[in-house]
Amino acid sequence: MPDKITGYLDMKLLRFTTAGSVDDGKSTLIGRLLYDSKAIFEDQLKDLERTQKRKGEENINLALLTDGLKDEREQGITIDVAYRYFATPKRKFIIADTPGHVQYTRNMVTGASTANLAIILIDARKGVIEQTLRHSYIASLLRIQHLLICVNKMDLVNYEEKIFEKIKKQFKNFCPKFNIKDIHFVPISALKGDNIVKRSENMDWYFGATLMHILENVHIENDINFLDARFPIQNVIRPQNIEFHDYRAYTGRVTGGIFRKKEKVKVLPSGFSSIIKSIDIFKENLKKAFPMQSVSIRLEDEIDISRGDMIVKYDNIPKVTHDINLMICWFDNKSLKIKRKYAVKHTTKDVRCIIKEIKYKININNLEKDFDDKIIKMNDIACINIRTTKQLFIDTYKKNRITGSLILIDESSNQTVASGMVI
């Protein structure tokens, strides 16, 4: 790591998402984590106990801790993304509980887009199914570096080792397609608490770490790009008052790399260069700005800069282009059409584009490229080419998850129809 970042980035914070098919136990798992880590308020626990008595259930329904919508509680499913927060002495966590239904795939993409780690749940009775592969492939597209495969409901298969090993082998056959190096397998029972926080006495054949131990110790420091400095301009600050008469600063969020005071930078798309005069946060001046910090940058030269422009290192610039090759997750009920026009949102820049070509679609059953089927429907994953009306400043998604991603919007309905990852 090129610089000491203590005080700027909290490396003890882990963002993770859960994914899997319907009724695989995602909400119950998160409820168990909250329950066993003592992150439930007393009034929440009493509410769960009242619900348990009213319904005559044997155990407390921990899924209710995340299923907050009325329809979710009535149907026993997750519909919207639910974010929950808890902490242990070792780490702080932000959880995104995402839906398992195919029609809510867009919600799963939303929850996973900022995650460091993804938990993929597999029902021990069903094994690897289509949604398992879909969610795992999306996690790999979103460049989630750490995957935790939890074979849940082991209590319903008598905690048999051979079932766990069969599913593990089944999933490993697809691992080369995912391009994720850090993958863990844990047999669990979210309902009973086996291998969640404490090691299970029912599975003495399992010698690996518990789910909580992995979450507390997974190494995420190397997941952040500290080399390629990117600063998309969100706004220009001109107070124009007596105290700050000549003040001009450019605000935004550092999406990659480290910016330093007195450092030479370049402004895109103009290509003009300057020196960073100051880096400001409210009334404080910083010597450096790190990824994900929202700051104001002042330059020594007067340059015409506006929203959508980008400040980068003088000798390290992204690709500036109209033509972009994307992997997309399609969300719309209407199929994707070649030559159709869409609005594009990329970092702080808004442009329009036309779909030039559909190169191939991913067959979700075997994760192979299908060059013959060019009909892209809801929840399909495909590779396409687009051409934008104005140049965008892009990196590959592998290099930078923010400058390497965009969304397509239907201008007639204002609905987001696809998320795209630059390849």
Image (cartoon, helix red, strand yellow):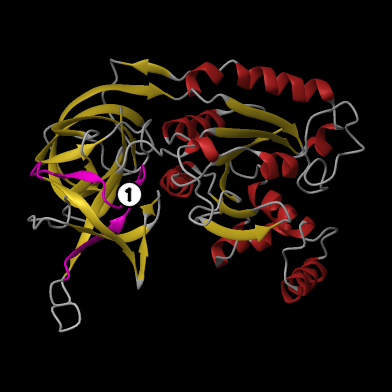
The image quadrant that residue 382 belongs to is: top left
Foreground pick, 85 / 363: 85
Find disc 1 in the rendering and name its residue.
Answer: 260
Foreground pick, 219 / 414: 219
54 with respect to 67 (left or right): right
Which three-letter amino acid code belongs to the residue tagged 1? Arg
Residue pictured at 35% horizontal, 71% vertical: 282
The image quadrant that residue 155 belongs to is: top right
387 with respect to 260 (left or right): left
Camera sees residue 151: yes
Q: Position of residue 121 (x, y in %)?
A: 64, 38
Give SS at disc 1.
strand
The image quadrant that residue 264 belongs to is: top left
Q: Label 1 crowding class (10 Å Cα cut-off): few <14, some 14-19, many 20+?
A: some
- Above or below, 368 against 224 in this view is above
Residue pictured at 16% horizontal, 66% vertical: 248
Q: Position of residue 112 (x, y in %)?
A: 48, 44
Q: Which residues are magenta?
A: 247-272
Q: Position of residue 256 (x, y in %)?
A: 36, 43
- Above or below, 222 against 253 in this view is above
Residue 403 painted magenta: no
Residue pictured at 79% horizontal, 29% vertical: 208
Residue pictured at 28% horizontal, 43% vertical: 406
Residue 251 painted magenta: yes
- Above or below, 397 against 60 in this view is above
